[in-house]
Amino acid sequence: MADHIPLHPVPRSTQRRAAYYTSVPAAQRHNRYQVEDESSHLDEMPLMMSEEGFENDESDYHTLPRARVSHRKRGLEWFICGGWKFLCASCCDWLINICRRKKELKARTVWLGCPEKCEEKYPRNAIKNQKYNIFTFIPGVLYEQFKFFLNLYFLVVSCSQFVPALKIGYLYTYWAPLGFVLAVTMVREAVDECRRYQRDKEMNSQLYSKLTIRGKVQVKSSDIQVGDLIIVEKNQRIPSDMVFLRTSEKTGSCFIRTDQLDGETDWKLKVAVSCTQRLPALGDLFSISAYVYAQKPQLDIHSFEGTFTREDSDPTVHESLSIENTLWASTVVASGTVIGVVIYTGKETRSVMNTSNPKNKVEMIGHFLLIVSYTSRMELLISVIHETISGNVTLSIFVTGVLLYTLWDTIKAKQNNHNLQPCLFYYLLLKKGKENIKTNEMAKCKR
């Protein structure tokens, strides 16, 4: 009986395979997992990876992010739940990229203490965290307010009151709350913008010692250029991305704090370039002909590739650079005094390139309430239009109360959109439709 046990699964459409398994004895059948010797077993069978092998594996297969299975919304549901904002933002980004094309980032050669030898112009080392300017403040604030459906809906309802046929109450009952909310929002945004401007001004006005042929010169953080030799004292913030050349510590290394860059509280060990650390004095940095070849700016703060070359020595000295020889911006020197050559400034620093605008996250219940809000409004609007046109209002007080309660509950659950005006608008519209029907009935009775 063991010879006639079918394997699972056996395709029914393949008669030859079924006949083969029923006619040929099990001992004579070819087993694709059967091995002849130990070598073939090692070649064909997959091996389990040990912990040591996992750590020594140089491939990035184990570090690649796994694809997340998500149920994406499609069609009208996607458009209602924020798809229209995504389309508008994509169009704006497309227009901005056409008008202002981004500069292609390239590798660079930086000569020590000679910013004038730079082949290209690099961005200013100025920090700018402001969201708006004089021209984009009002449009930006209005967009942030009316990108939500309920706020935009209330604006449309308020604008409809300028039409005499749709006017229900006084204009100030609609525009006064809207104007008050917009005024408070603009004042709050203006105060926050002023605070950001003051913080940026303080950071850009910090003074650092710049090493020149004539000696040390005080320079602002915003005036630092690629190729400058900057001296950073203990407990002082590093103003830009630099290559570590010298330190006051005898060991030729120092510690820095990177909690403002990557959130890690432990100190990082940095090692100075051995060729410049062995020089007797700081002034000897200008007596040598040396340059740093750095890779193009990138987002990764844990890797760096470059070389330090000294041409005036015989033979020419080439020293490879790694992440241990770098001092990234927004980090703080924890020990000793360091001297470095600036390689990246402004928007090309690691800290700025890893900064992104915060996105407003909406929870799943928020998407659900948004759909309910659309549905309830459309249902109520269709009911009002139908009953008003037909001239036969049959809605009872219970049904009207349920609709208004559902609408109010949806609005109340929506974050930062506590608004009862749409409910009152539809209630008054129903009331006005009933009054028109009563007037028509009275006119018919008089006739």
Image (cartoon, rainbow, N blue to C red):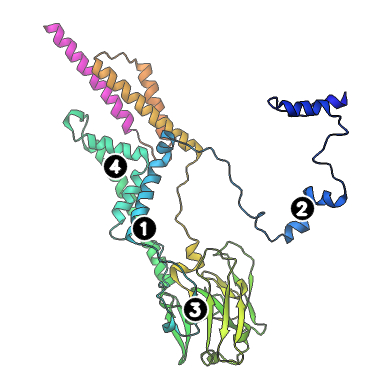
Label tally? 4
Q: Residue 335, can we see it?
A: no
Between marks 4 and 3 in the image, the one whose residue lies nearer the viewer = 3
Q: Nearer the viewer, residue 168 or 321?
A: 321
Disc 2 marks which amino acid?
Answer: Met
Mark before the other along the chain sequence, 1 or 2: 2
Disc 3 marks which amino acid?
Answer: Thr
> Residue 97 — which label?
1
The residue under the point 23% across, 37% down is: 159
Mark before the other along the chain sequence, 1 or 4: 1
Mark before the other along the chain sequence, 3 or 2: 2
Task: Please rate how many residues cluster around mark 4, counting C-alpha atoms within 10 Å: few if below 14, some from 14 to 19, many from 20.
Answer: some
Disc 4 marks which amino acid?
Answer: Leu
The residue under label 2 is 49
Mark before the other along the chain sequence, 2 or 4: 2
Q: Is residue 385 left or right of residue 68?
A: left
